Amino acid sequence: MNRVPLGYDSVEFPSDCRWIRIIDQSQLPNREVFLEIESLEDAVDAINKLKVRGAPALGIFTASCIAKFYRDFNKRDYSEARNFLINISDVIVSSRPTAVNTNWAAQKMLSCFYNNFSENNFELEKSKELLIDSAKNIKNDDIIMSLSIAENALKLLKHGDNILTHCNAGHLATARFGTALAPIYLGMERGYSFKVFVPETRPLLQGSRLTAFELSKSGVDVTVICDNMASSLMRNNSINAVLTGCDRIAANGDVANKIGTSALAVLAKHYNIPFYVLGPESTIDCKSLNGDQITIEERDGNEITEMWFKERMAPMNIKTHNPSFDITDSQLITAIITDKGVHRYPYNFSVPDK
């Protein structure tokens, strides 16, 4: 693809990683505000408050933060440098436990350090250069990954298809182009016409705020629906395929993704509509044998009862249950589409972690 859908990347940094700039996704679609990340506290706040989000984007953000903060490290002792890297990696990774890409990126950065340096062979400036290069490579590889996913997925779609997606797995959630939305952008460039239906994705409205924002800005025919309207569209033969992203894929093909994904998969199975999960191979977590072994983040109940409303929309002191993700059973998934190809049920991801 020749164009950047929004004209900017969700995570940007120069060749020397002296600064990191993100689009504050918590303020979209009404305001396009860019934030510079100055400290580890800024990074954690950005992750916790979903100013940066999306599994691939979180991986890029993690790598660039490690490179930037290490760039400012000035002690020339190997052990102190190693411990510094371990500490900032642990803090960032623990900020969003369900998304596997934060840990994946942190391990890539740490491996770069371990594979090139030791107690008896350590050069501070050289180590900074290599970690910066590693962060740049992770971002560049993600762009290539998105294009590969787009090519693999587009083969399963047809001109004129009506597509249902969920949450945001597009340009904003990756280095560029996206996962679930990447074939839509590629198809448009090649003359395909798609109509995309976007559930609002309660409680944080990533569908209506983010996916509708980036698709409409890119000229895609997009319609926002409430989360509980998908069945009506499917029953009326208004949906030809469902495309979603993923935050973690277990070895057996169970998928952790935004809350509500599993319900869409059940509906698609009932109405015999293809349900495709799109994501990079790096999202596969072979250490999680199935979805039961994936940690699900529980968020503040105020997101349900108060956020977005002028007045509270539930009784005071009412109990809430607000998991950020759910698990979609592998047998509900028509295919898992990665940068390496199209995987179909039964899934057996036995490749080692990268």
Image (cartoon, rainbow, N blue to C red):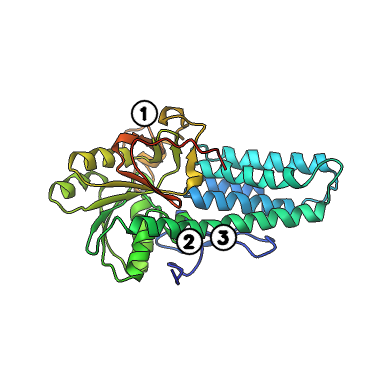
Cα distance in 3D space between marks 3 and 2: 9 Å
* Residue bearing the label numbered 3: 140
Image quadrant in which you'd find residue 217: bottom left
Q: Which callout, 3 or 2, points to the residue nearer the camera?
A: 3
Identity of the residue furthest to the left in this view? 236
Left or right of 237 in this view: 227: right
- Look at label 1 and name its amino acid: Lys
Q: Residue 281 placed where, x, y %?
A: 48, 46
Cα distance in 3D space between marks 2 and 1: 39 Å
Q: Quadrant of the C terminus?
A: top right
Q: Is residue 309 above or below residue 13?
A: above
Residue at 65% across, 54% down: 134
Looking at the rendered structure, which numbered label has been put on residue 176? 2
Q: Residue 206 placed where, x, y %?
A: 38, 51
Left or right of 212 in this view: 267: left
Q: Is residue 213 above or below residue 180?
A: below
